[in-house]
Image (spheres, rainbow, N blue to C red):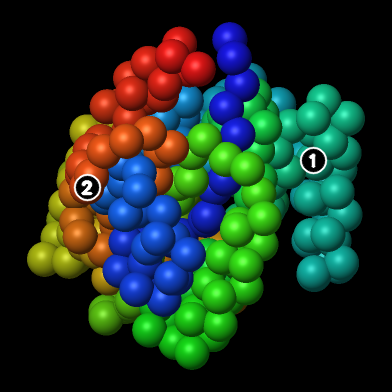
């Protein structure tokens, strides 16, 4: 397959376009628009380059986990953050050798890690010539989507992009300012993301958990059971805290329903056309045509 020259701007939402004269100039020349990347994390990126995906989160339950040896490292909990760094290093070292994406474990309880596995190995875009900008994701979480820091970062990013040859510029998701913070039940068999709470348990216990969930601030979704027998997805702008990632509440979050305005990603493909809002799977088909036509 012919390679594309791909630029990914993590967490660039369409409303940021007004801060980037260079991207505005490109959008006037080429097909561009909002991009529905689906629910959760990584789902849209895999769909964009592979055509489909069932990924909803980085971690899923697997009794034959590649992380099962972590159970021998539970004693490292007594060393706090230093122990966590060592656990993360031991997890990532073999991944680094294989050329896989490195993962963060942040505040995931070590005794839960040994029952989990990682849904991402190689980044799906890296089969192409790939350039990545991750600043907006970090800055958005820390300062919010309307911050001065976001505008400054976009200016710096567009200066770099203007010097790069490309076929596709895209973002993997949008970003929503946090308007509400909620808590959810934490059980022995669960994974608590910032935007999603996932549980594995008996039907009887799941019924009890469901009754304790703040359903006025989210909804139950059906997905591959390896990601949870019961999955609660928070409404856009609702942060679940405490969770397994954040030491303190953040200003903005993503991973919600991709149909929501604030979750829309952005794309420009170097071919004639105006504004066209599409789903990741539709852009995947257009990219196949684009490659064949090169």
Write down the quadrant of residue 180 in the picture: bottom left
Q: Is residue 260 above or below residue 147?
A: above
Whether residues under marks 1 and 2 lie with C-beta atoms below 8 angstroms apart, the answer is no
Between residues 17 and 37, which one lies in front from this camera angle? 17
Seen from the viewer's position, the closer of residues 66 and 120 is: 120
The residue singled out by tag 2 in the image is 275
| 173 relative to 117, above or below | below
Residue at the outermost bottom position: 148
Q: CA distance from mark 1 to mark 2?
A: 43 Å
Q: Where residue 229 appears, x then y in whole percent?
A: 31, 34
Label 2 element class: loop
Residue reaching furthest to the left: 216
Q: Front-most of 260 and 230?
A: 260
Q: Is residue 256 left or right of residue 55?
A: left
Residue 32, label in figure? none
SS type, badge 1: helix
Within 10 Å of disc 2 (Cα), the crowding (few <14, some 14-19, many 20+) is few
Q: Is residue 252 visible?
A: no
User: Can you give x and y, in whole percent of width and height, for residue 230 in the image?
Assistant: 28, 40
The N terminus appears in which quarter of the rendering? Answer: top right
Viewer-proximal residue, 241 or 202?
Answer: 241
* Residue depicted at x 65% and y 38%: 130
Task: Mark 1: give few (<14), some (14-19) or many (20+) Cα within 10 Å.
Answer: some
Q: Is residue 99 visible?
A: yes
Disc with the residue nearer the chain's start (1 vs 2): 1
* Residue assigned mark 1: 91
- Compared to residue 86, the image places residue 45 above or below, namely above
Image spot of residue 4 (x, y percent): 57, 27
- The residue at 80%/69% (across/down) is 81
* Residue located 57% across and 40% down the image: 166
Q: Looking at the picture, does residue 61 appear above or below residue 186?
A: above
């Amino acid at each position: 397959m012919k390679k594309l020259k791909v630029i990914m701007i993590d967490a660039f939402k369409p409303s940021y376009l007004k801060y980037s004269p260079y991207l505005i100039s490109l959008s006037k020349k080429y097909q561009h628009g909002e991009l529905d990347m689906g629910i959760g994390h990584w789902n849209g990126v895999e769909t964009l380059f592979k055509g489909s995906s069932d990924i909803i989160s980085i971690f899923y339950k697997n009794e034959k986990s590649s992380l099962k040896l972590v159970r021998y490292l539970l004693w490292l909990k007594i060393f706090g953050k230093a122990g966590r760094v060592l656990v993360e290093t031991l997890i990532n070292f073999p991944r680094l050798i294989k050329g896989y994406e490195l993962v963060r474990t942040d505040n995931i309880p070590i005794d839960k890690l040994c029952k989990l596995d990682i849904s991402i190995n190689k980044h799906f875009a890296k089969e192409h010539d790939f350039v990545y900008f991750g600043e907006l994701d970090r800055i958005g979480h820390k300062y919010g989507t309307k911050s001065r820091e976001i505008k400054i970062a976009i200016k710096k990013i567009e200066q770099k992009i203007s010097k790069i040859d490309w076929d596709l510029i895209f973002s993997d998701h949008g970003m929503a300012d946090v308007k509400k913070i909620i808590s959810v039940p934490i059980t022995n068999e669960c994974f608590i993301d910032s935007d999603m709470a996932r549980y594995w348990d008996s039907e009887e216990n799941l019924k009890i958990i469901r009754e304790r969930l703040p359903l006025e601030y989210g909804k139950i979704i059906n997905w591959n059971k390896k990601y949870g027998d019961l999955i609660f997805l928070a409404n856009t702008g609702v942060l679940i805290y405490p969770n397994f990632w954040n030491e303190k509440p953040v200003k903005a979050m993503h991973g919600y329903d991709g149909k929501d305005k604030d979750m829309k990603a952005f794309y420009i493909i170097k071919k004639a056309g105006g504004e066209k809002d599409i789903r990741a799977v539709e852009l995947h088909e257009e990219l196949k045509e684009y490659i064949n036509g090169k």
